[in-house]
Image (cartoon, rainbow, N blue to C red):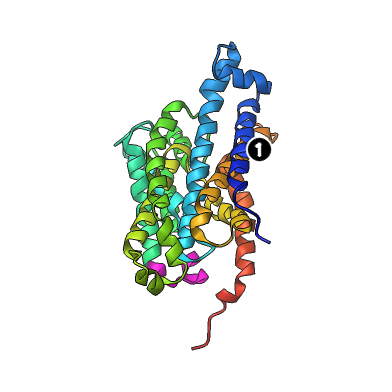
Amino acid sequence: MRLSRLPLIPGLILVIAGLSVASLVVGPAPIAPLRAVTALVSDQGSATVVVRDIRLPRTLLAILIGWIFGLTGAGLQGLLRNPLADTAVFGAPQAAAFGAVLVIYSGLVGALSWLLPFAAILGALASVALVVAVAGRRATVVVLVLSGLAVGSLAGAGTSLAISLSPNPFAVTEIVFWILGSFEDRSMVHVWLAAPFILVASGLVLSSTNGLRALALGEETARSLGANVMRLRLLLVAGAAIGTGASVAVAGSIGFVGLVAPHLTRPFVGYDPARTLVPSGLVGAALLLAADCAVRLIPSQTEIKIGVLTAILGVPFFLWVIARRKAELVEMPA
C-alpha cells in the first residue's frame, strides 16, 4: 500500500539535517557534534576553521548537487515515461566534464571562473538534447541506453584525448578530478559558483509540474488538456543541462544519483511524476550527503572519489532496473 506523502518531506528534511551534522563531524579530525554545530556560529579555535572552511562547503555542495540530480532525474523519467532516464544515462556528466576540461585545457578560463559553469552547461545541454532527439518520443530502453552510451563515450574520449595531449602532470591531475568527481578541497567560492545555476535549474523543472502530470496520460491527451509538450521538453532539458553543468563544474562527474532517487521515492508517493519531483530531490541530497560521509570513513591512504562510490553503488541498481524491465528489451516481431 502506498504510504502517505505528508510525513515524507518533513522526514527527509530531518534526515538531511542529521546527515549534515554528520558531514560536519566526520573526517580525519573528528569533532563532537555539539562543538561542530557551535563552530558554525562562534569561535571554537581550530574546530571553527575545519568546520567553516573545509566541511561546510562540501556539505552544502552535497545538498545542492544531490537535490538537483534527484529532481532532474525524476523530471526526465516523467518526460520520457522511462525509469532509466537520467542525466548520467544521457552522458550529460561526461559531456559537461568535457566542456569544463576543454576550456581549462585551452587556457580560456580558470578553475574558479564564472565562465566554467557555462562551458559545462553547454556540454550537458548538447548531450541531453542529442539523446532526446535520437531516442524520440517513444524511446525504448535499448535506444535510450545506446544513445546515452554513444554520447557519453564520445565525451569521455574527448576528455581522454585532453589527458593524452596534456603538457604537464599537474594538468592531468586537474583533468582526472573532472572524471572521477569529488567534494575534496572545495570552498564557499565553489558553492556560490554553483548555487545560482542550480536554483535556476530547480525553478525550470518545478515549473513543469502540471505538464508532467498531463503528459503521464500520453502526449495526445496532454495536448487536449492544454499542455504545451514542446515547452515542457525545453524546460526539463534546459533544467537538466543547467543543473548538471553547474554541478560538474564544481564537483566533477557524479553519476546515478538521479537514477536511484526517483525509484526510492515512488513507493511512498506513487507514480504521479509531479508528486515525485520534490521528494526525489530531497532523497538525492540525502544520498549524496551519505556518500560524502562514507568516502571520508572508508580506510584508505587518499580519499576515495565520490563519483567512484556512486558508480559502484549505482551500476548494480541500474542493471537491476533493466532486469526488471527486460521484456522491453526484446524486439517485437515485425
Q: Residue at x 62, y 37 (%)?
A: 14
Mark 1 Cα shell of 10 Å, populated few (<14), some (14-19), many (≥20): some
Q: Which residue is drawn at 63% across and 55% down?
A: 268
Q: Is residue 164 at all visible to an observer of this figure? A: no
What is the quadrant of the N terminus in the image?
Answer: bottom right
Count of numbered circles in the view: 1
Q: Residue at x 38, y 74 (%)?
A: 220
Residue 293, image x, y percentages: 63, 35
Residue 134, image x, y percentages: 38, 68
Judging depth in this view, the residue of 261 and 177 nearest the camera is: 261
Above or below, 164 against 81 in this view is above
On the rendered structure, is 295 left or right of 144?
right
Q: Give the range drawn in magenta.
A: 134-149
Q: Name the residue under label 1.
A: 294
Above or below, 160 against 151 in this view is above
On the rendered structure, is 68 left or right of 287?
left
Q: Residue at x 52, y 69 (%)?
A: 141
Q: Quadrant of residue 11?
A: top right
Q: Is residue 2 at all visible to an observer of this figure? A: yes
Q: What residue type is labelled 1?
A: Ala
As for residue 105 lying within the magenta part, the answer is no
Residue at the bottom extreme? 334
As for residue 135 lying within the magenta part, the answer is yes
Dot 1 lies on which element?
Answer: helix
Judging depth in this view, the residue of 244 and 233 nearest the camera is: 233
On the rendered structure, is 250 left or right of 12?
left
Residue at the right extreme? 299
Q: Is the magenta stretch mostly helix, strand or loop?
A: helix
